[in-house]
Amino acid sequence: MTDETRPEDQSPAVAPAIPEAGATHSLPEHLPEEVPEEIQPLHVPMLRIIEVGLAAWVVALVVMLVVPALHEGDRDWWPWTCVAGFVLGCLGWAYVRRGRGNARDAA
């Protein structure tokens, strides 16, 4: 390295401005001065989601009972899975309906 390119010999062209204590800061001109409004969470219709899930379990149970190959032999427990899903979904629906799971959807 030559003497001309050593980092310690180079001084910055403009020293960074250090704000004084108690000084107020202004935003740069290219930034808006207004503060954006607070972001609100999206409303998720939990009761509707649970109802769709319940309907899916009922459809699955009907399909299981209509197609004999889906509930015979080693698969004899499959319809009970649909029944358990429906019952647990009903419990979840009642829980949300009372307002404990999602107060906004409470009736």
Image: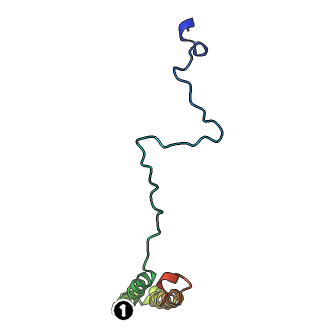
- What residue is rendered at 42% in x and 81% in y? 49
Q: Position of residue 105 (x, y in %)?
A: 47, 84
Q: Toward the viewer: 97 or 33? A: 33
- What residue is rendered at 52% in x and 88% in y? 88
Q: Toward the viewer: 80 or 90? A: 90
Q: Examine the rendered structure and indicate whether residue 81 appears above or below residue 37.
A: below
Q: Examine the rendered structure and indicate whether residue 3 appears above or below residue 18.
A: above
Q: Position of residue 50 (x, y in %)?
A: 44, 84
- What residue is rendered at 44% in x and 90% in y? 79
- Can residue 75 be seen in this snapshot? yes
Give neighbour class at mark 1: few <14, some 14-19, many 20+ (Cα, 10 Å).
few
Q: Position of residue 14 (x, y in %)?
A: 52, 23
| Residue, disc 1 | 62
Give the amino acid type for the residue marked by disc 1 in the picture: Val
- Can residue 2 be seen in this snapshot? no
Q: Examine the rendered structure and indicate whether residue 20 appears above or below residue 67.
A: above
What colour-coding does the image apply?
Answer: rainbow
- What residue is rendered at 57% in x and 6% in y? 3
Say which quarter of the image contains residue 1: top right
Q: Position of residue 107 (x, y in %)?
A: 47, 91
Q: How many marks?
A: 1
